[in-house]
Image: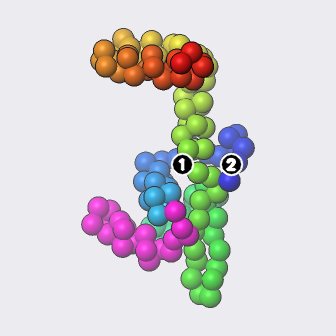
Amino acid sequence: MKREAAALSKLSGAELEIMRKVWELSEPVTVSRMLEIFFESRKWKTSTLSTLLDRLIEKGFLTKTLKGKVNFYAPLLTEDDYKERETQAFLSSVHNGSVKSFIAALADGGISPEEVRELRAWFQEKSGER
């Protein structure tokens, strides 16, 4: 399900909101189901939601399959793949690819002693020091 990172465009806030629901549902979803999900919070019309879903297809995030007279939308990448892609893009553009620079920025921004302990344990585990 992993796609080439360069082939995917950046998601808008609304597009990301839709993708989060698609990932959460973990099965192909219809426009009508998405309208139900977003009725209270967004009150989107069918045309608005359809346009957003079409954009997600164009950007390479969704696929559409016609079953009978109903379109079903499914993700082309996992949420974890998306997070990894976005994290790498952020590190590259903001921190010149440096994880250390990123962690230093987090630490300077007020990371708690408990979070430092958790990170230390995580790094030890990842490096095989445990």
Decide: few, some or many residues near mark 1? Use Cα within 10 Å; few <14, some 14-19, many ≥20. Answer: some
Residue 88 picture location, percent across and down = 60, 30
Is residue 28 found inside the magenta-colored segment of the image?
yes
Residue named by callout 2: 2
Residue 40 picture location, percent across and down = 27, 66
Mark found first going from the N terminus, 1 or 2: 2
Dividing the picture into quadrants, the one containing residue 32 is: bottom left
Dividing the picture into quadrants, the one containing residue 4 is: top right
Residue 99 picture location, percent across and down = 55, 18
Q: In the rendered view, does 4 fall on the left or right side of 13? A: right
Residue 35 picture location, percent across and down = 39, 72
Is residue 10 found inside the magenta-colored segment of the image?
no
Callout 2 amino acid: Lys
Callout 1 amino acid: Glu
Q: Which residues are magenta?
A: 26-46
User: From the viewer's perspective, is residue 36 above or below residue 62?
Assistant: below
Q: Tag 2's secondary structure?
A: loop
Residue named by callout 1: 79
Give the Cα separation between the discs numbered 1 and 2.
10 Å
